[in-house]
Each structure stands twice: as structure tokens, then as C-alpha cells.
Image (cartoon, rainbow, N blue to C red):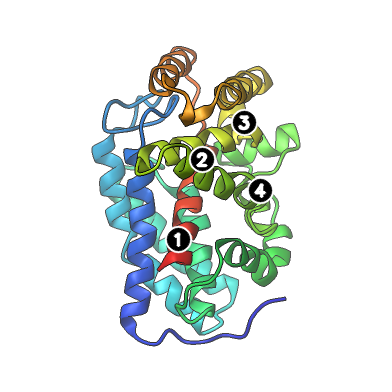
């Protein structure tokens, strides 16, 4: 059940949580090798984005994350959270020249910021915080159908799969069941290698998620190819394999050739990293 609202102990708590949300976006961007995704190495399958643009976008939306923490602490209604989110989206579009770089991340990370505000800025288990998003706002989110104008929303409606809204409404089950366990597994497989742990997490999400970005770009065949590729990577030992970077880089080239991009999994990688950092802070 939802917890009672509890104001952060200071303004610095909201700033700290907001900074962790921004850090999660940067850590997702810098992870490499990521099949089809933008990184500091190249733009992947995205002809309209590069790492510099994503950094500008993340910086533009960062000031709104503390606002969402404070709104959550006040037990603000979802309509107020949405208003702040729309302001963040406008700032993103201004920074990117109209390119949707982080709309999904604004939605998911924003809700987690608000839930963290309800916890009073105190660390709680990552899974518990994810569940709180569903407990607090899941019913209301679930009453809103997937967007018929966004690529992901159209794919969710066409193929009857969970989109970002349904994932959040259910308390981020893919993150709880696959993302967080894989992040922890990656740390055991490659101690001290933060990049390896992030890639293990990404591939675990790719292997299980009905990624609407993949469906939009490649249809069911593209999604199946991506999921099988990710499962084969994990079955071969994941980041515990000696040649895992070479394997992931080869997959990156194949995804770029097919113009595939697991954007939904990338968003949930950022969600996983954010929840993990909140539980440890």
C-alpha cells in the first residue's frame, strides 16, 4: 500500500535525488558496447542524435527532477507531476532542436523521484521504491491509454504489449525481475567493472522486454532477433565471458545495419541504475 507523505529533511535531499536521476541518464549514455544505441563511441542506429545531444537533453531536464521530489513529498496529485514533466519535456525539446531524446526517461525517472519524495529522501530497497510507483499512481496511469502519436505508444497499441506507461503502472516489473538482478549479477561476474554490470543489465532487459522501440523499427521480427541475440549473449556467460566486449560490439554493428535500437531497454537501464543508486544513498 502507498506510504504516507514525508517531506525531505532538507532542500539538499531533493537536490541529491535529482542529481542521482541525472547521473543515471549519463551512466546509461556512457555504457558501451550497447547494440544500436547512442554512446560516446557513435550514434548507433540513431541518425538524429549523438552523445552531445543526449548530454544537453539530460542537462536540460535535470532541474525538474528536484521539483518532482518535492511534489512527491507534498503528496501532489498525478496531474501536478504531469505538469512538471511537460515543462521538462519542453526544456528537452528546446535543447535538442525538437528531437525526443528523453521523453520516456522523464516519465519513468520523474515518477521515481516523486516516490522517493514520499519516502522523505531516505534510502529504501530498490524493489520497494519501484513498487511504490505502482501503488501510488498505477491505477490512474492505467486509465490512460498508450499515446496514439508516439512511436512507442503506437507500437504498444498495434501489437498489444506493455508500453512505458503500463510498466510504470505495474511498479516496473521488468526492472525488479530482470534489471536489478542482472546489475547485481554483473558486479559479481566482473568485480570493479561498472561498465560490465550495466551491459549485463541491458542485455537482461533486452532478452525479456517487449520493447516498443524495437517493434516500431523492426516489427515482431526485429524484436525477436534482438531478444534472441540478448539471450544468446547471456547464455554464453554474459559479461563473465572473456570475449564479451567483442561479442557485444559485433551485435552493435548488426543492430545498426538493421536500424534496430532497444530504446525501451535503455530507458529501463537508466531506471535500474537510478533505483540502485537511491537504495545505496
Q: Is mark 4 in CB contact (under 8 Å) with mark 1?
A: no
Q: Which mark is residue 86?
A: 1
Identify the residue shown where x is 51% and y is 48%: 184
Quarter assignment of residue 210: top right
Residue on which the image places disc 3: 207
Which label's residue is closer to the chain start, 4 or 1? 1
Q: Quadrant of the N terminus?
A: bottom right
Residue on which the image places disc 2: 201
Question: Is residue 204 shown to the viewer in this render?
Answer: yes
The image shows residue 61 at horizontal and vertical percentages of 34, 58
Q: Is mark 1 in CB contact (under 8 Å) with mark 2?
A: no
- Secondary structure under the numbered disc 3 in the rendered image: helix
Q: Is mark 4 in CB contact (under 8 Å) with mark 2?
A: no
- Secondary structure under the numbered disc 1 in the rendered image: helix
Residue on which the image places disc 4: 177
The image shows residue 113 at horizontal and vertical percentages of 47, 67
Which label's residue is closer to the chain start, 2 or 3? 2
Q: Is mark 3 in CB contact (under 8 Å) with mark 1?
A: no
Of badges 3 and 1, nearer the viewer stands: 3
Which label's residue is closer to the chain start, 3 or 1? 1
Task: State how far apart marks 1 and 2 are (Cα).
Answer: 29 Å
Please rate how many residues cluster around mark 2, counting C-alpha atoms within 10 Å: few if below 14, some from 14 to 19, many from 20.
Answer: many
Amino acid at each position: 500500500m502507498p506510504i504516507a507523505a514525508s517531506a525531505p529533511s532538507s532542500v539538499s535531499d531533493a537536490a541529491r535525488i535529482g542529481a542521482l536521476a541525472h547521473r543515471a541518464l549519463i551512466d546509461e549514455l556512457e555504457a558501451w558496447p550497447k547494440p544500436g544505441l547512442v554512446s560516446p563511441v557513435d550514434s548507433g542506429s540513431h541518425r538524429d542524435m549523438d552523445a552531445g545531444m543526449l548530454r544537453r537533453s539530460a542537462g536540460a531536464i535535470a532541474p525538474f527532477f528536484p521539483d518532482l521530489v518535492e511534489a512527491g513529498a507534498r503528496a501532489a496529485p498525478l496531474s501536478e507531476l504531469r505538469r512538471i514533466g511537460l515543462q521538462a519535456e519542453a526544456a528537452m525539446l528546446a535543447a535538442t532542436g525538437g528531437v525526443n531524446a528523453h521523453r520516456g526517461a522523464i516519465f519513468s525517472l520523474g515518477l521515481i523521484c516523486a516516490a522517493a519524495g514520499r519516502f522523505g529522501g531516505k534510502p529504501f530497497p530498490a524493489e520497494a521504491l519501484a513498487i511504490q510507483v505502482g501503488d501510488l499512481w498505477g491505477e490512474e496511469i492505467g486509465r490512460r491509454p498508450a499515446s496514439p502519436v508516439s512511436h512507442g505508444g503506437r507500437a504498444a497499441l498495434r501489437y498489444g504489449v506493455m508500453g512505458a506507461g503500463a510498466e510504470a503502472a505495474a511498479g516496473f516489473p521488468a526492472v525488479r525481475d530482470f534489471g536489478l538482478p542482472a546489475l547485481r549479477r554483473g558486479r559479481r561476474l566482473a568485480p570493479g567493472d561498472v561498465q560490465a554490470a550495466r551491459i549485463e543489465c541491458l542485455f537482461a532487459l533486452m532478452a525479456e522486454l517487449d520493447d516498443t522501440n524495437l517493434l516500431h523499427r523492426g516489427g515482431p521480427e526485429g524484436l525477436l532477433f534482438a531478444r534472441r541475440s540478448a539471450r544468446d549473449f547471456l547464455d554464453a556467460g554474459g559479461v563473465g565471458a572473456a570475449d564479451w566486449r567483442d561479442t557485444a560490439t559485433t551485435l552493435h554493428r548488426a543492430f545498426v545495419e538493421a536500424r534496430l535500437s532497444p530504446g525501451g531497454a535503455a530507458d529501463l537501464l537508466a531506471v535500474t541504475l537510478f533505483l540502485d543508486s537511491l537504495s545505496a544513498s
